[in-house]
Image (tube, helix red, strand yellow):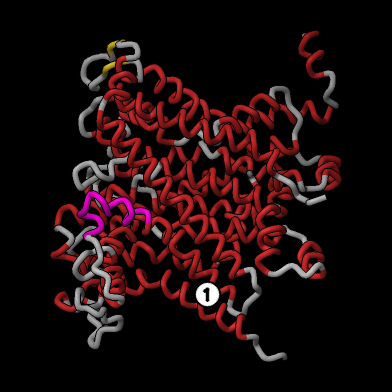
Amino acid sequence: MKTRSGILSKYSVVQRSEIKWAYLFIAPQMIGLAIFTLGPILYAGYLSFTKWNLIKPPQWVGLENYIDQLQDPTFSNLLKNTIVITAGYIPLVMIVSLAMALALNQKLRFTVIYRMAYFMPVVTSLVAIALVWRWVLQPDFGLVNYLLGLFGIDGPTWLSSTQWAIPGLIFMRVWWGAGFYMVIFLAGLQGIPAEYYDAAKVDGASSWQRFRHVTLPLLSPTTFFVFIMASIWTLQIFDQVYIMTGGGPGEATEVFLLRIYELAFRYYRMGDAAALSMILFVIIGCFTYFQSRYSRRWVHYDLG
Amino acid sequence: MTPAKPSRVLMHVIVAFGALFMMLPFFWMLSAAVKRREDIFVLPPVWIPQDILWGNFVEVWTRVPMAQAYVNSLKIAGTVTVFTLLTSSLAAYAFAKIEFPGKRISFATLMATIMIPSQATLIPVFILMSRLGWIDTHWPLIVPPALTNAFGVFLLRQFFMGVPDDLIDAARIDGANPIQIYRRVAIPIVRPALMTLAIFTFLGNWNAFLTPLIYINSEELWTVPLLISNFQDAYGVESEWGLLMAASSLALVPVLIVYIFAQRYFIEGVALTGLKG
């Protein structure tokens, strides 16, 4: 009794009466956290060291799954695809979304309508819209090759070509995701005090110089955040690939989640799937770590 | 009014052209859904067909279980949204406005999990669900998302912190217990943030694909994205473009309605995610 009142001594009488309410309030989310996040992540760690086909009990195999994964040509292919997608998608989506944000930040008329159009793909279901994009990228009667044809360019076969399938997916994803990052960039741009632009104008800076020396440096925290978020989400691509290419042609568009899905729910190799999901988890964890570690250093609300 | 500068006119043209480009896939989707089959792949594309045929929009309800899928998706996304709002706002209020032992450690744990991708826990949760006998039911699509929304707790906590302590103390003096204070004092103040969270939760669960794909087999339990995906596999894309496009258009209807009427909350919601960094 004494220790209890010792712990509680810093609380007032009213506060003490509220403690049981607090536990009640946080209970659903904390129970959910334990059952659906913390427990499972530990269990996934354990499973990754076992072989398990859901029928016989899991069998401990140590690091075998990880070694298998790292030596498997499917894994290096998967890693290569992921890197190619990320390297192509991230710069492109950042440039497009920043350009959209800069354009909409000009306080043009009808900005609300333009913003609505740019953001619209973001809210749509990837499954529904991916089908439309199969037509957009269709080699013979698709929209992109038709437009290219107007300029005398003979377009590639996109999704059915091992070389052009990834660029096709990237192209669609830029269309789908740019509006999201545009809004984040817009918020960042609106956080830059107008005085800096006024001062730069007085100093005779051209609009390019203002962009280069005021906008870009002051936008750096936003840019960094967009970079990290886009990277994390690119590692988790699934819906789009599943619907548009199914990982093909061959394994040209195989990505992490598709492989995890196939290992677990097509071949019932739970241990291998768990190992692969732990590898993905660690990679994403690194990005998250950099985000929290360096964002503080990057964030400057003010030039002064 | 001063006459518009040429650079501004050019800017307008570019921005409008960009907007048009963004909308093209939507236009094509709608137009393919109301065209004759042989006109779908005509080049240059005919955006507005001469005869508008609504047959696909009728067939999509009769030939495939679209009505059932619609009800299922609405039910799942709606239930998850209601319970997410309830559980996250309760937890957020406690973390923001009540002092209790273990508060720091429990909040820190919750925040540490915010970035754990749900795919990392996919397999153990699947096994848990099969132990519970919940495979091929809607429970796995409802219970985990309704009880785990660390981001929602974080977001709402930020807003509850802005509720003045004086207001809460005044209610305490009047003898209100925490649940009454939460309901009558705090909730009305954070209503816009709740709206944002509601919209994003609904949207995310309406569009969800990986979890229904894993958990659901029976046709009468399909969600709309699952229906579109299975329908594509079953009938083949080439033969049934018009029908598929009608189904896709219908899948986007609730989302676009919510989006058009609540655009402000979407934009604010994304900007808030940005502030998290």
Q: Residue drawn 27% across and 54% down?
A: A164
Q: Name the quarter where the N terminus of chain B is drawn.
A: bottom right
* Kind of residue at badge 1: Val
Chain on which label 1 sits: B
Quarter of the image for residue A48 reads top left
Q: Residue drawn 20% across and 75% down?
A: B40
Query: Where's residue A212, x and y in %?
Result: 66, 59
**A188 to the left or right of B150:** right
Residue A87 appears in view: yes
Quarter of the image for residue A262 reads top left
Magenta: main secondary structure equals helix
Q: Is residue A169 magenta?
A: yes
SS for callout 1? helix
Residue A28 appears in view: no
| Figure check: A31 above or below B93 | above
Q: Name the quarter where the C terminus of chain B is drawn.
A: top right
Q: Which residues are magenta?
A: A157-170
Return the residue at label 1. Answer: B15
| Figure check: A7 above or below B54 | above
